[in-house]
């Protein structure tokens, strides 16, 4: 790292300067978005190098989970497979994206410590790397979603544009949560274990393996559960159902507040992150 960049990252010159430098990092990362995509693809290739079916092991393991949990819980809850299998399949796949971005976000800066300390790459580049890596994983798991939609006939009634909008909301909100986890984990190495435990708890408290109708539409677990709104914005249109209007309001507010908080934390800690590592 050259001396000028090192001084900009570590020196303190007032709040306005810190905000400008944080914005500069975001702009620079967007200009190098191709680098983040290349790093994400390299991560996937490296993880499955030498494997016969490569990243499709993700799809296979996810498909087995969907089949096992879907068939068992449908019998336990006395729900038809036509309604339950697609619900569980989409819940597991899309919640997997959320938890993947947040959990892997904990290692975003830690794994990139060498590059951050030796180069002047924007820090947000590594956040986009984590998001893209999970987007690639989702692309492989879409095989399961497509198969379920076709087999159970939901492709006739699904609303794909609305589902795409919900997916955008999902990524936008998961990204800021992953960024916060990255900053906190760079400073406190116990954070990843806490985050993983919280995400596991959230998975069971969110309608992933169980139907929300069991609680009622106005139950607190649904109204104030951000993960439910993130899932429902994607899953409901794919199953030919309407998305509640307050879901979009909730997700939009969460995105604005979440990114404002994340940017404020990043502005304050940006110059310290390299030293944390």
Image (spheres, rainbow, N blue to C red):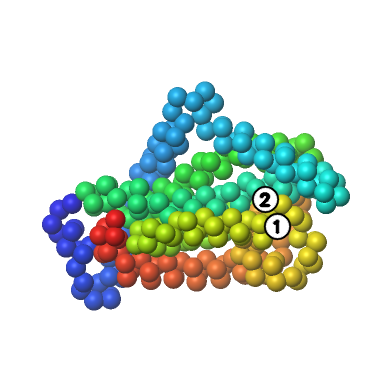
The x and y percentages for residue 161 are: 65, 51
Mark 2 element type: helix
Q: Residues within 10 Å of mark 2 (few under 14, many from 20)?
A: many
Q: Residue furthest left?
A: 3
Residue 72 seen in the current view: yes
The answer to whether 4 is drawn above or below residue 57 in the figure is: below
The x and y percentages for residue 122 are: 30, 54
Give the total number of marks visible in the rendering: 2
Residue at 46% over, 50% down: 104
The answer to whether 258 is drawn above or below residue 130 in the figure is: below
Residue at 37% over, 62% down: 188
Which residue position is annotated with label 2? Answer: 91
Q: Give the position of the C terminus as an image quadrant.
A: bottom left
Residue at 41% over, 33% down: 46
Quarter of image, res 142: top right
36 sits left or right of 204 in the view: left
Q: Nearer the N terminus, badge 1 or badge 2?
A: 2
In 3D space, how far apart are the residues under numbered discs 1 and 2 (Cα atoms)? Answer: 7 Å
Q: Residues within 10 Å of mark 1 (few under 14, many from 20)?
A: many
Whether the residues at callouts 1 and 2 have beta carbons within 8 Å, the answer is yes
On residue 9, which mark appears?
none
Residue 179 seen in the current view: no
194 sits left or right of 78 in the view: left
The x and y percentages for residue 128 are: 42, 51
On residue 207, which mark appears?
1
The answer to whether 41 is drawn above or below residue 175 in the figure is: above
Residue at 78% over, 47% down: 73
The x and y percentages for residue 47 are: 44, 34
Mark 1 element type: loop
Quarter of image, res 41: top left
260 sits left or right of 109 in the view: right
């Amino acid at each position: 790292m050259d001396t000028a960049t090192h001084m900009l990252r570590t020196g303190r010159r007032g709040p306005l300067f810190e905000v400008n430098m944080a914005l500069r990092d975001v702009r620079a990362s967007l200009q190098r978005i191709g680098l983040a995509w290349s790093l994400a693809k390299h991560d996937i290739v490296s993880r499955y190098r030498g494997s016969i079916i490569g990243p499709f092991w993700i799809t296979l393991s996810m498909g087995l989970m969907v089949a096992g949990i879907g068939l068992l819980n449908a019998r336990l809850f006395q729900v038809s497979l036509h309604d339950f299998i697609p619900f569980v399949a989409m819940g597991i796949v899309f919640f997997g994206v959320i938890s993947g971005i947040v959990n892997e976000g904990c290692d975003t800066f830690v794994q990139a410590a060498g590059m951050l300390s030796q180069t002047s790459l924007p820090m947000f580049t590594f956040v986009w790397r984590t998001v893209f890596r999970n987007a690639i994983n989702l692309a492989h798991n879409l095989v399961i979603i497509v198969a379920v939609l076709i087999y159970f006939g939901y492709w006739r009634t699904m609303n794909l544009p609305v589902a795409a909008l919900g997916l955008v909301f999902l990524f936008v909100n998961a990204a800021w949560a992953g960024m916060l986890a990255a900053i906190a984990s760079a400073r406190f190495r116990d954070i990843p274990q806490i985050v993983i435990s919280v995400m596991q708890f959230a998975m069971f408290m969110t309608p992933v393996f169980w139907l929300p109708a069991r609680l009622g539409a106005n139950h607190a677990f649904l109204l104030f559960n951000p993960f439910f709104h993130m899932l429902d914005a994607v899953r409901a249109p794919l199953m030919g159902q309407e998305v509640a209007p307050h879901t979009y309001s909730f997700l939009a507010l969460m995105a604005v507040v979440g990114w404002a908080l994340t940017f404020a934390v990043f502005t304050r800690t940006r110059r310290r992150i390299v030293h944390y590592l």
